[in-house]
Image: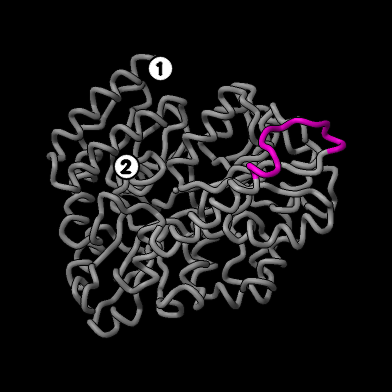
Amino acid sequence: MPSIRRALIAGAAATALLATACSGAGAGGSSGEAKSINVLMVGNPQMEDIAKLTKDTFTKDTGIKVNFTILPENELRDKVTQDIASQAGQYDVATVGAYEVPIWHKNGWLQELGSYADKDASFDKGDLLKPMVQSLSGKDGKLYALPFYGESSFLMYRKDVFAEKGLKMPERPTWHQVADLAAKADGAKPGMKGICLRGLPGWGELGAPLTSVVNTFGGTWFTKDWKAKVNSGGFKKATKFYVDLVRKHGEAGAPQAGFTECLNAMSQGKVAMWYDATSAAGSLEDAKSSKAAGKIGYVYAPVEKTESSGWLWSWAWAMPKTTKKADAASKFMLWASSKKYEKLVGEKLGWSRVPAGKRASTYEIPQYKKASAAFGDVTLKSIQQADPTDPGVQPRPTGGIQFVAIPQFQDLGTKVTQEISAAIAGKTSVDKALNDGQKLAEDVAKKQK
């Protein structure tokens, strides 16, 4: 998946890498004698929090030292794919998502984790939200990753700015209503743009919000019989709409803006709206780092032809089969995904920062309900409404909302979004970007038939 966060990530990553270097990388040693494990994770706020809290809690209680390596989303994806696919065995635990788990399980790369969860009564596996369990399970029905937090997507907007401008945000806006509101909110305050939309290349960066827009505009990457549809129909309409909106009323430096940059832009008052992950709300409502805390409204993902359009994702803990420290690694993962850890975050860092979206019980905690009053209900309902098997207006050849659940999509999605990002930068046209993308998609489709 950074401005305010980039400095934090860089510092945390440097510290983590130094710790790893000092303690020695690799997964050597027997599982029963492991005194340290190596964890590779994406540099999102929730991961930064666990890196800060582990030493004085988990390590203190278990004696197991955790060496964190923290990377930005695109770098993380490259690193973890390389390590796990090559069976290098450098890491004992890695953060992966709903896209990777079914594919990597099929390849035999991941350790089954459901049995570990079943043995730990305090973990309460039955409390995990069903969409999260389903997205992190293999075809055999077994759990191959433990969710750290779950998310859908929604629209965030500055309530105070809208009130000052006399603008009204519908609970379930259409994308054309959003474009109109972005035009009216653009310039509402000095230096403020109407909306932030990801423009940074990457199937999980620009590709995630764009594909959810494509779905609701009636488009799809592939039809049920594997015909590529990148340069026609709803895909073309959605992409032109998206590029036009971000070029006219989007954030400064949009072609380089991913989740982290948009989080900073929203939290620092540089944009009036932002469409992105529901998990962003916890950081936005943290008054210690966000100037917009308490000023933001949250509504469902904008639609056009579908009733809903929110995506479904979970950053989750996975254990490569190459690890020789399974016992220690499983203890860390169970702790990191537990109710106990959520309580720790709430008490130490603030309840809005709890890594939510994975457990039903989280939404019944009085302190969390109060801290998430503005966004908790719409987050939970967005997750529950997300349907990876039927996210658009036509049948799909495989699952996935903001991605296509095939191994080739990682490369395809990244290459196509590179072209679309160039269109956002004004270096090429949307038509050329999509025509080039169509050829790439057709090559992928041939291999699927």
Horizontal relation, residue 281 to residue 365: left or right: left
Which residue is tagged 1?
Answer: 448
Which residue is tagged 2?
Answer: 201
Judging from the image, what secondary structure is the residue with disc 1 in? helix
Judging from the image, what secondary structure is the residue with disc 2 in? loop
Horizontal relation, residue 42 to residue 300: left or right: right
| Position in image of residue 265 (x %, y %) | 34, 66
Horizontal relation, residue 347 to residue 102: left or right: right
Name the residue located 19 percent from the left edge and 66 percent from the top edge.
180
Q: Amino acid at mark 1?
A: Gln
Q: Is residue 25 magenta?
A: yes
Q: CA distance from mark 1 to mark 2?
A: 25 Å
Q: Quadrant of residue 98?
A: top right
| Position in image of residue 227 (x %, y %) | 30, 23
Q: Earlier in the sequence, mark 1 or mark 2?
A: 2
**Residue 406 seen in the figure:** yes
Question: Which of these two is toward me, 29 or 123?
Answer: 29
**Residue 131 seen in the figure:** no
Is residue 326 depicted above or below 279 in this figure? Answer: above
Question: Which of these two is toward me, 270 or 68?
Answer: 68
Give the extent of the magenta segment. 20-33
